[in-house]
Image: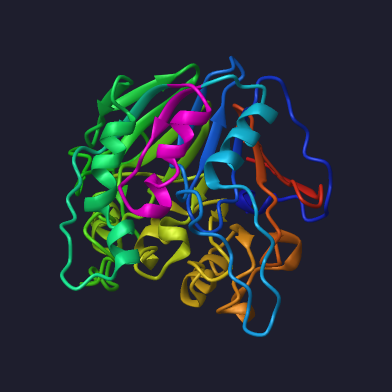
Amino acid sequence: MKRLAVALVIMAAPVQAADLKIISIDVEGGAATLYVTPEGRSLLIDTGWPAGRGAPRAAPGEPPVPASLSSAERIVAAARAAGLTRLDHVIISHYHVDHVGGLMDLVKLFPIGQVIDHGPNREPLREGLNPGQLANAPATLYPLYTAAIAGLKHRVLAAGERLRIGGLELIAVNSDGAGSPRPLPGGGGAGQDCDGVASKAENGGEENPRSLGLLLRWGKARILSLADTTWTLEHKLVCPVNRIGRADLMFANNHGSDLSNPPSLLASLAPRVVVVNNGPTKGADAAVLQRLQALPGATVWQLHGALRSPAANVTPARIVNPGRDDNGNLLINISRDGRIGISNQRTGDSETYSP
């Protein structure tokens, strides 16, 4: 019953000087999450869309959605609000446009210390692409990415390797299609729900299962960010042996897409808090939202209301941006003892979850 010790009323989430701060930046269904340690060290995982792409579209018959900041501009605004003058580390999980697209703009706007990825692009061009699809293809974006980071420190992080950023430890759960060769600290037990569907043929493009997925450890807290890792590899990571262990905070994989998030992964991780980095019409598939909300002791937040599956949305108090043109961030602070505080930047509402 200890896992159900959750603050059920809206209250101020206390922020301590020794807390890890996480900002889930609204980049309209892309991915960009900023971590700031008490020492002022910083990590950004993914960079959202290129300027001019990924913006919300008006519903049929409605006026156009007003122009808004690009993903890179939103990242810079969040970094400056957190007191940063540079990003020490930027991780590009994989080369799909909603993850790497903002990097080429970001390097022009804000200093970056080191860039980390899974290695070369693995997704070849498909035949018959229209001009827009060609511009967004990983094979098109990857040369632009390598040119943009020329002269910056660069590291390829293989599965099982580690990186320390101040008091924050990162361990690569999976990278370039391979899982960690050995159980991570806290892993090694039996997986749960391993008799379910073990694989799906569709993966949304080869770069998805090549994602660089991370376990981040902050004191007793364990944070899981597997980017767009897909169903088959996720199942292998926890079945028959759970190589990951538990998760206190989990970012739903693949923006909450049903290409990812198998029941075996969710049951084996048993997360206390799940954040779905979805857009109004991207991710947050109904089947995934239902699976997440059925997890014992878990609380689910969405970055946007899912317009394609509104009946499956979480309670409105835990949807940061209910409208197409709302663009608040989700603010998270985690203490070393595992307490998690979450605040909706748009409304100021907060909740605290005990370890």
Residue ID at (38%, 35%): 91
Magenta-drawn segment: 87-112
The residue depicted at 53 percent of the width and 74 percent of the height is 290
Q: Position of residue 60 (x, y in %)?
A: 62, 84
Where does the image place residue 109, in percent across and percent down from the top left? 52, 30
Residue placed most toward the observer, 327 or 258: 327
Magenta span contains residue 107: yes
Residue 248 versus residue 78: which sits nearer the camera? 78
Q: Tell which residue pokes out farthest to the front in this image.
A: 131
Image point (27%, 25%), residue name: 155
Residue 335 position within the rendered picture, expressed as x and y whole percent measured from the top left: 64, 29
Q: Position of residue 89 (x, y in %)?
A: 43, 25
Decide if residue 268 is in sight here: yes
Residue 268 lies left or right of residue 144; in this view the side is right
Considering only vertical position in the picture, is 157 above or below 317? above
**Left or right: 96 with respect to 280?**
left
Q: Quadrant of residue 82?
A: top right
